[in-house]
Image (tube, rainbow, N blue to C red):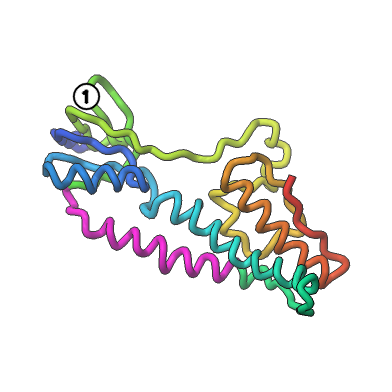
Amino acid sequence: MSEPAMKTMNVEYAIIGAGTAGLGAYSKISRQTDSLVMIQDGPYGTTCARVGCMPSKLMITAADYAHHLTTSEFFGVTATGRVDGRKVFERLRRERDNRFVANNLRYVDKIPAHHKLEGRARFIGPGRLRVDESVEVNAKRFILACGSRPAISKVFEPVMARVLTSDTVFELEDLPRSVAVIGTGVIALELGQALHRLGFVRKVESANVVDAEAV
């Protein structure tokens, strides 16, 4: 059986990535021309909405409430409470998926089908892309909005089963007993502070539960 013929697309603009930057570029360019395509590898929804700023802020909000419980006595207000880690993550994913990601997906759904192409793009020559092994894209201009992924050093290979990244931490079922945050980027600092505050309350409530610490 012969392999299916390679499909070819000829456009003026090829946008690689449908995250925040790619969608911003699409919004501006699509007002000027219909000769464009936006290529996305993986699920739509943007890094910010799925695994970045927005779920991180949702965790920070929960952590703020926990922090107020532990510091309220300073202001003459006695308060007690308990952090339910499962409910913290359930609420985080519910708000993330049903509000932030959903809003983004609704916008993507409105983009004409001929402007969207799903698959992994790679350059095969000047002005030429191949998306997976099924579509060749010839374009006059390329916009690289590929985003990024966490890089895990080889030094962590012996404990890889215990390693989390910003792509996976929000999928936890419950708060960890302890965690070390490696890195000082914005998301790392936010997660470190939030996990520490949430973990501190768990330690207060139960002497045999170790609090989360940011390193």
Magenta region: which residues? 89-114
Within-10-Å neighbours for mark 1: few <14, some 14–19, many 20+: few
Residue found at x 59% / y 62%: 59
Q: Which amino acid does label 1 sit on?
A: Gly
Residue found at x 35% / y 63%: 103
Q: Residue 127, located in which quarter of the rendered image?
A: top left
Q: From this viewpoint, which residue is outermost toward the front?
A: 75
Q: Mark 1 points at which residue?
A: 127
Q: From this viewpoint, which residue is outermost toward the top?
A: 126
The picture places residue 130, in percent across and down from the top left corner, at 27, 31
Compared across the picture, whether 75 is left or right of 30 comes to right
Relative to 125, say whether 28 is above or below: below
SS at badge 1: loop
The picture places residue 48, in percent across and down from the top left corner, at 45, 51
Compared across the picture, whether 88 is left or right of 162 comes to left
Residue found at x 15% / y 33%: 12
Quadrant in which the C terminus is drawn: top right
Magenta stretch secondary structure, dominant:
helix
Foreground of the two, 7 or 48:
48
Relative to 104, say whether 135 is above or below: above
Residue found at x 26% / y 29%: 129
